[in-house]
Image: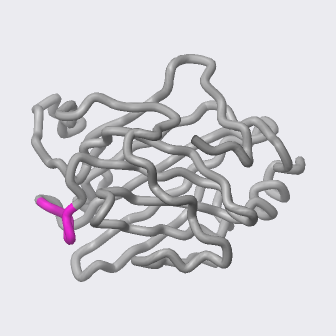
Amino acid sequence: MIVAVLACALGTAIPSHASGCFTFADDAGDTALALTGIADAEPDLDIVGVQYLTTATHVGARIEVAQLATMPAKAPGDVFQIGFTHAGTYVDLFAERLAGNVVRPSSQPAGLTVTATFDLATSSVTLTAPLAEVATLAGASTANATLSDLNAATSADYGTWLGYDEAYPAPGTTYRVGSSC
């Protein structure tokens, strides 16, 4: 099951956004069109920080970009992605946003109920999945679990996803489920 929202609709609200409260930061102005190496100033794909978060029922991350646009700026669509490893299972959560504000969330491995929230006021995109589904997928409880291999990325969607910006924390950085800034 896949769910897309343009406003917070989780049973337990996403933790409030604290500007500059990142699990890890990324340099502003460092976007480039993949495969070309050409610097490209598309502020709605320029990651400036990533905040991993947990609610009572969901785990995910908020990607803050330089300036989130109401629509993809140059490409027909854009893609936002977060990734992490839980109990040896790597998980990616995606939100593909197309013209007309059509949002298609997905996961890899497939089957997680991904929620995507686009917030123009905080210039951020939040991707979450239910803790119970992540636990089932990995075969291990998420209670106080430590997530590793944290990352985030944005891409332009031209029918093929062309990477724009990737963000990684310092090597060895982890996130404990249930922790906050």
Question: Is 72 part of what is drawn in magenta?
Answer: yes
Q: Is residue 98 left or right of residue 166?
A: left
Question: Is 44 part of what is drawn in magenta?
Answer: no
Residue in front for this viewpoint, 50 or 80: 50
Instruction: Decide: is 62 above or below 165.
Output: below
Q: Residue 9, position in %: x, y?
A: 55, 79
Total labels: the figure holds 0
Indicate the colouring scheme: one colour
* Quadrant placement of the N terminus: bottom right
Magenta portion: prevailing SS class: loop
Q: Which residues are magenta?
A: 69-73
Q: Is residue 4 left or right of residue 177?
A: left
Please give the name of the residue rendered at 22% of the width and 53% of the height, measured from the top-left corner. 44
Please give the name of the residue rendered at 51% of the width and 19% of the height, measured from the top-left corner. 170
Q: Residue 130, position in %: x, y?
A: 71, 65
* Quadrant placement of the C terminus: top right
Q: Residue 123, position in %: x, y?
A: 29, 57
Query: Residue 112 occupies which quadrant of the picture?
Result: bottom right
Residue in front for this viewpoint, 143 or 13: 13
Instruction: Decide: is 103 above or below 37.
Output: below
Query: Residue 10 occupies which quadrant of the picture?
Result: bottom right
Query: Residue 75 occupies which quadrant of the picture?
Result: bottom left
Instruction: Decide: is 118 above or below 47.
Output: below
Query: In the image as oriented, which residue stretches furthest toward the top?
Result: 171
Please give the name of the residue rendered at 38% of the width and 65% of the height, measured from the top-left corner. 96
Q: Is residue 136 left or right of residue 105?
A: right
Please give the name of the residue rendered at 74% of the width and 63% of the height, measured from the top-left corner. 56
